[in-house]
Image: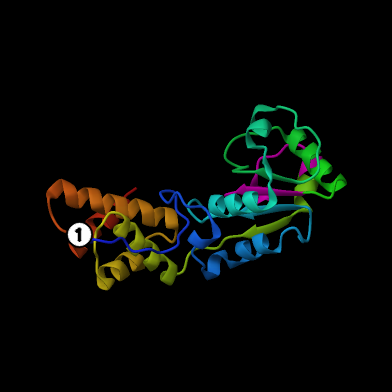
């Protein structure tokens, strides 16, 4: 069950400290977002909203873009209502739909970006039209922005993710077990991480090796919530 060497698969997950291009797993679902990063600074519009579910790679991609563009992160300023000094260049606002922010501040930032030929990348879990915004002018600005969505992972990606998550724990699992998990799990990388963690903890608590029956127990328990 133990492995001497962990499987090295490039992957954008929270437990992986590497956040460069070499550690980003290429998949169909994330290709539009990768293309966005590769095309900078030649974007269709000055403001782009990158949308994707938890664990989809948004933070990894925004970190790559921040290094490429030397963007200034303005997340805290917008959440705390602090002024953002006008300047040229790039800006990054992360997790826009997670915590309330200063709508007027974002509106002025978008105007600054447009006036100075800069760029602004906003990351979020949901589309801008689903945010509970009250400022009509901001809604209009965001409606004119480019939106790039990261789609749900396919089976190939989920299998690679699960193999890597087990390998990170020095656990060896076979193809049949991974295929069993993939066909019964929620379609998200965040779910994959939670499932592997739960399976690992359950196996350790019982002093047993990881089997399909043990995986089935974890998956069944998740279905009840």
x and y percentages locating residue 24 in the rendered image: 51, 61
- Residue with the most extreme front position: 4
Which region of the structure is painted magenta? 119-138
Q: Is residue 82 above or below residue 187?
A: above
Pinpoint residue 74: horizontal percent, then vertical percent: 67, 37
Q: Is-magenta flag for residue 52? A: no
Give x and y (percent) for residue 62: 60, 51
- Mark 1 Cα-neighbour bin, 10 Å: few <14, some 14–19, many ≥20: few
Give the camera-side residue of 129 and 54. 54
Residue at position x 30%, y 50% from top? 197
Is residue 191 something that shows in the picture?
Answer: yes
**108 horizontally vs 35: left or right:** right
Left or right: where 87 falls relative to 194: right
Q: How is the image coloured?
A: rainbow
Is residue 134 within the magenta segment?
yes
Q: Residue at position x 43%, y 53% from top?
A: 190
Q: Please say whether residue 223 is visible from this viewpoint.
A: no
Residue furthest out toward the right: 115
Name the residue rendered at 59%, 35% in the picture: 99
Q: Position of residue 200 (x, y in %)?
A: 24, 52
Instruction: Please identify the quarter of the rendering in which residue 149 is found.
Output: bottom right
Per the image, the residue denoted by label 1 is 2
Q: Which residue is the extreme one toward the left?
A: 207
């Amino acid at each position: 069950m133990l492995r001497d060497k962990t499987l090295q698969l490039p992957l954008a997950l929270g437990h992986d400290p590497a956040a460069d291009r070499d550690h980003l797993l290429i998949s169909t679902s994330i290709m539009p977002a990768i293309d966005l990063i590769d095309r900078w600074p030649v974007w269709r519009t000055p403001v782009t909203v990158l949308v994707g579910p938890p664990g989809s790679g948004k933070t990894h991609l925004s970190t790559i873009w921040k290094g490429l563009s030397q963007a200034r992160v303005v997340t805290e300023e917008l959440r705390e209502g602090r002024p953002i000094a006008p300047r040229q260049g790039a800006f990054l606002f992360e997790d826009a739909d997670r915590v309330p922010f200063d709508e007027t501040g974002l509106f002025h930032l978008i105007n600054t970006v447009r006036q100075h030929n800069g760029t602004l990348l906003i990351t979020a879990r949901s589309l801008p039209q689903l945010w509970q915004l009250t400022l009509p002018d901001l809604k209009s600005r965001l409606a004119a922005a480019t939106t790039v969505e990261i789609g749900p992972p396919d089976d190939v990606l989920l299998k690679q993710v699960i193999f890597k998550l087990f390998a990170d724990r020095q656990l060896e699992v076979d193809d049949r077990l991974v295929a069993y998990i993939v066909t019964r799990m929620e379609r998200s990388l965040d779910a994959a991480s939670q499932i592997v963690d739960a399976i690992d903890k359950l196996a350790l608590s019982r002093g047993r090796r990881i089997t399909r029956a043990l995986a089935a127990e974890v998956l069944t328990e998740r279905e009840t919530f």
